[in-house]
Image (cartoon, helix red, strand yellow):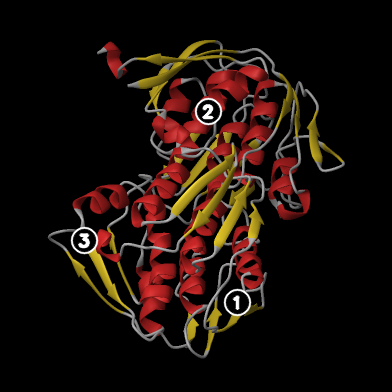
Amino acid sequence: MNAFEIHGGKPLKGEIIPQGAKNEALQIISAVLLTEEKMTIRNVPDIKDVNKLIDLLASLGVAVNRLEQDTYEFQAKDINIDYFKSEEFKQKGSGLRGSIMIVGPLLARFGEAAIPKPGGDKIGRRRLDTHFLGFEKLGAKFNYDPDNHFFNVDARGLKGAHILLDEASVTGTANIVMAAVLASGTTTIYNAACEPYLQQLCKMLNRMGAKITGVGSNLLTIEGVDRLGGTEHRMLPDMIEIGSFIGLAAMTGSEITIKDVHFEELGIIPTVFSRLGIQFELRGDDIFIPAQDQYEIDTFIDGSILTISDAPWPGFTPDLLSIVLVTAIQAKGNVLIHQKMFESRLFFVDKLIDMGAQIILCDPHRATVIGLNKQFKLRGIEMTSPDIRAGVSLLIAALSAQGKSVIYNIDQIERGYQNIEQRLKNLGADIRRIDAQPGGH
């Protein structure tokens, strides 16, 4: 099993370039199925989840041409619809939660799709109902085969509809948008997600010939068109990586410059980290974080303990709550972390407590962090990464800790973070990949 061995406790220094956005990539790359013309996508992150999706598209019959390290040309001209029924498709699709994103484009263009129950993170229940309820509103009929764990969808002749989403799901909104762009008539999606990544998808679809208005709001109007053409697209930098590097700089007392961050697309993220007491300055479109010996958590105006919680955009993204929690360990002051959207994402705190963090896990959704104010360093331990974001949080903790840490199951980290080992080494981190099993087996 791959693992990281980390010798922490020393400051880092240098520049780091965030990868292309993972969550945008899964939507954008799926959208190439909507046209038979060539699509050129730039700033594609070289990570496992994205590479698995590209491999899945190639197996479906999409012509994939890698032009540069981060640039691909796709052409979905000759799609093999029968591939859905194959055992190979079942294996590839079930190993990737993002595979659900190909359903909307396939329904729109071919009128049918099938998808095995997707895999992915173990961070609690992630319903797919929003996707399928939206497809049903457009006229699709689907059935779930519990024996084979397969969703089969028939969508010949999709028609525009008024859709009120039961939750502002980013992937659900994106999937329904992609299904609706080729449906006849007008579709309205209310309570739509409005994340920058979804805005990127809608802008790209409009360049392809779609007619989507209300982009950036929670009410999207989509006028169906007969066909879409090709275009070029560049991904935004990954805001979760940017937040992770801000937390890393604070925890390790490092001077780090994060390059080309598209600051205007980061929403409330910089504000939340500044409320933890982290100083930074914007230099052009780079975030410069000076080395800080101390950072102090804000309180609310009445003096009560600060609460940081997640919410649909433009609220704070749930993907960064694990990073905020670990960053707060070495702050001065206290903070309540309230993870509203997923029920199991805080269970990794037992590892942080073993390292010396002062954390009270109140319930599956809430944890109180009592900051150490850098009076005590965390101690290195052996631990296992349960999901992408918790894995990087443990990695940040290990880099700040005294002594040696080993993190197992780093495949979870590498699903979302590109070449993370080398990029951290470039900042001066003492990290290396080893082949080891938990417990020394």
Which residue is nearer to you in this view: 327 or 99? 99
Residue at point 31%, 62% (across, down): 80
For residue 103, side relative to residue 321 (left or right):
left
Q: Residue 422, image x and y in percent?
A: 58, 21
Residue position for label 2: 358
- Mark before the other along the chain sequence, 1 or 3: 3
Inspect the image, locate mark 1, and give the three-letter code of the amino acid beneath it.
Answer: Ala
Q: Tell me, yes or no, if residue 298 can be seen here.
A: no
Residue at point 69%, 28% (across, down): 250
- Mark before the other along the chain sequence, 3 or 2: 3
Q: Residue 269, image x and y in percent?
A: 69, 48
Q: Which tag is nearer the camera, tag 2 or tag 1?
A: 1
Q: Which mark is residue 85?
A: 3
Q: Residue 46, image x and y in percent?
A: 53, 38
- Mark before the other along the chain sequence, 2 or 1: 1
Q: Quadrant of the N terminus?
A: top left
| Residue at the farthest right position | 284
| C-beta proximity under 8 Å, tags 2 and 1 | no
